Every structure is written in structure tokens, then in C-alpha cells.
């Protein structure tokens, strides 16, 4: 394959084989293999220190692997980093918005930095897409946590990236804000964007992901759909159990009634 060329669009959006990374004596990634289908939501689960953020940093060209091969959107991360960076967007654990600017100004700024035509129209379109039109003229400092995260994701979509990495996208958000972000992530995949998200929230992965992988001590220990993962355990015994509402159920119901 000639330099700069990508593989077929039928290939996985992300393909990782034998990925290794160590910091001196600490082996963070120890032979990671995974594939992420185009237009899907892939959840990477793992406790703190499992290697999730290190893996995302390698996928997004921010960190060089010690061994293995990685292709993102058909491009080799090690030799075609510029092409990879043009195809992706990375949203970290904390919203990267400028609180002094309005929501619309944040979007316009990013569009101008990407040298895109009609930055105002791009901003208006994304504000409408993420239900932020009414708040567009307000400073981002006045936004709720969910609104800030939606704005952050909207900013990451400028330039139409094929693949978006969401690192702990709902960390620190309240239940309502988390549901807002979940809806935004689902909309991304529905529009054809490939989403790889890292999370410690099992419910989040269960709610969003087409496939789920568990990273433990630097290795993928299981990878499959939710149904496939459930089949790894013995069949459930059917018993009558009176289900009590969870605290989240109570919270959402009370807030909805008070609105």
C-alpha cells in the first residue's frame, strides 16, 4: 500500500493487534487486540489503572506504542499520524469549552481554527442538533454540566470526523445530565460516526454500546455484545422478586414532577 492510502471502507474503523506499552518496569498494555466496526458504539470498560486512557492516547496519536499495530479509519497510527488526526476527534474527561465565550462563539472559534467555510452556519447547525439553540448566545460559564458536555461533543464534531473518542464522557455528571449525553452519543452513531468510549459505569456501557470490551491489567479479557457477555454466566434462575425503585428512578421521577 502506498503511503497516505487507506484501507477499504469495509475494514473496521479501529483495528488493534498486539498493542504493548510500558513505562519503565510498569507494563500498562500487554498485547491488546480489538476491532471496532464503522458506525458503531464500542465501550471499553476497566477500573482505574487498567490502561484505558493509555490506549486512547495511542489511538489518537498522542502516545507512541512500544509494539503492535494500530489502524484508525484505515490509516496506520505510527506512519500516517496526520491522516489519523484528520479523521478523528478526542473528547477528554473534562469539557474543553471556553467559559468566557458563548456557546455559539466556542463553535465558531473551532470552525475557524479548522479553516472551514461558513463557521457561523456550522455553529448554528450544531446548536440545533444538540438542542442548544436557545442557549447559544449565553456564556458557557452559565451552562449546566450536561449542556457543557453536549457543547463539548458538538465542538468535537466540527470537521465531520469519522471516529470520535470519548474518555469518561459522563464523569461527574448528575443523572439528568448523563441521560442528555447518552442521547447525544446515540445520535452520533445514528449519523454514521464511530464512537469509542471509555467508562467505569457499567450501566452506561449497557445502555449505549453495540459491543463491550473489558480491559484488565493491560489485556482485553472479554469482548462481545451485551448478550454474548451475559451468556458467559450461568443461566439465571427465575424467581419472583418485588423490584424496588432505585435512587436514580426516584430522583428522575421527582425532578420530572417538579418541572
Image (cartoon, rainbow, N blue to C red):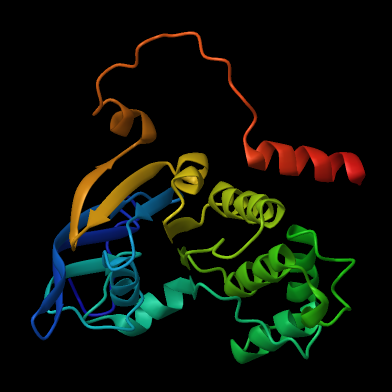
- The percent coordinates of residue 131 (x first, y second) are 79, 59
Q: Can residue 51 be seen in this view?
A: yes
Locate residue 115: give its quadrant. Answer: bottom right
- The percent coordinates of residue 177 (x first, y second) are 69, 57
Q: Is residue 192 left or right of residue 80?
A: right
Is 239 in front, or is 4?
239
Q: Is residue 11 visible?
A: no
Q: Is residue 131 left or right of residue 176?
A: right
- The percent coordinates of residue 203 (x first, y second) are 49, 43
Is 165 in front, or is 171?
171
Q: Is residue 184 above or below residue 167?
A: above
Q: Which residue is drawn at 44% across and 78% down?
A: 86
- The percent coordinates of residue 51 (x first, y second) are 27, 68
Q: In this view, does 20 lie above or below 96?
A: above
Q: Residue at x 33, y 65 (%)?
A: 48
Q: In this view, does 69 lie to the left or right of 253?
A: left
Is 89 in front, or is 145?
145
Q: Which residue is drawn at 22% across and 44% down?
A: 222
Q: In which quadrant of the rendered image does the N terminus lie?
A: bottom left
Q: Is residue 118 left or right of residue 188?
A: right
How many numbered marks appear? 0
Amino acid at each position: 500500500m502506498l503511503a497516505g492510502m487507506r484501507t477499504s471502507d469495509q475494514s473496521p474503523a479501529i483495528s488493534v493487534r498486539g498493542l504493548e506499552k510500558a513505562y519503565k518496569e510498569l507494563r500498562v498494555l500487554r498485547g491488546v487486540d480489538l476491532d471496532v466496526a464503522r458506525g458503531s458504539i464500542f465501550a471499553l470498560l476497566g477500573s482505574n489503572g487498567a490502561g484505558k486512557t493509555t490506549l486512547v492516547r495511542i489511538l489518537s496519536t498522542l502516545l507512541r506504542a512500544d509494539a503492535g499495530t494500530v489502524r484508525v479509519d484505515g490509516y496506520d497510527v505510527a506512519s500516517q499520524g496526520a491522516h489519523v488526526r484528520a479523521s478523528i476527534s478526542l473528547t477528554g474527561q473534562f469539557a474543553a469549552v471556553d467559559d468566557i465565550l458563548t456557546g455559539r462563539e466556542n463553535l465558531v472559534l473551532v470552525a475557524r481554527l479548522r479553516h472551514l467555510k461558513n463557521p457561523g452556519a456550522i455553529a448554528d447547525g450544531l446548536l440545533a442538533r444538540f438542542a442548544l439553540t436557545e442557549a447559544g448566545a449565553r456564556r458557557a460559564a452559565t451552562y449546566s454540566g450536561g449542556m457543557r458536555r453536549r457543547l463539548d461533543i458538538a465542538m468535537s464534531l466540527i470537521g465531520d470526523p469519522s471516529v470520535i473518542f470519548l474518555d469518561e464522557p459522563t464523569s461527574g455528571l448528575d443523572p439528568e445530565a448523563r441521560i442528555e449525553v447518552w442521547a447525544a452519543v446515540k445520535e452520533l452513531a445514528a449519523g454514521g460516526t464511530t464512537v469509542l468510549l471509555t467508562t467505569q459505569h457499567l450501566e452506561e456501557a449497557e445502555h449505549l454500546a453495540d459491543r463491550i470490551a473489558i480491559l484488565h491489567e493491560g489485556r482485553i479479557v472479554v469482548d462481545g455484545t451485551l448478550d454474548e457477555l451475559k451468556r458467559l454466566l450461568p443461566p439465571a434462575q427465575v424467581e419472583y422478586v418485588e423490584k424496588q425503585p432505585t435512587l436514580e428512578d426516584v430522583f428522575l421521577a421527582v425532578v420530572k414532577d417538579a418541572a
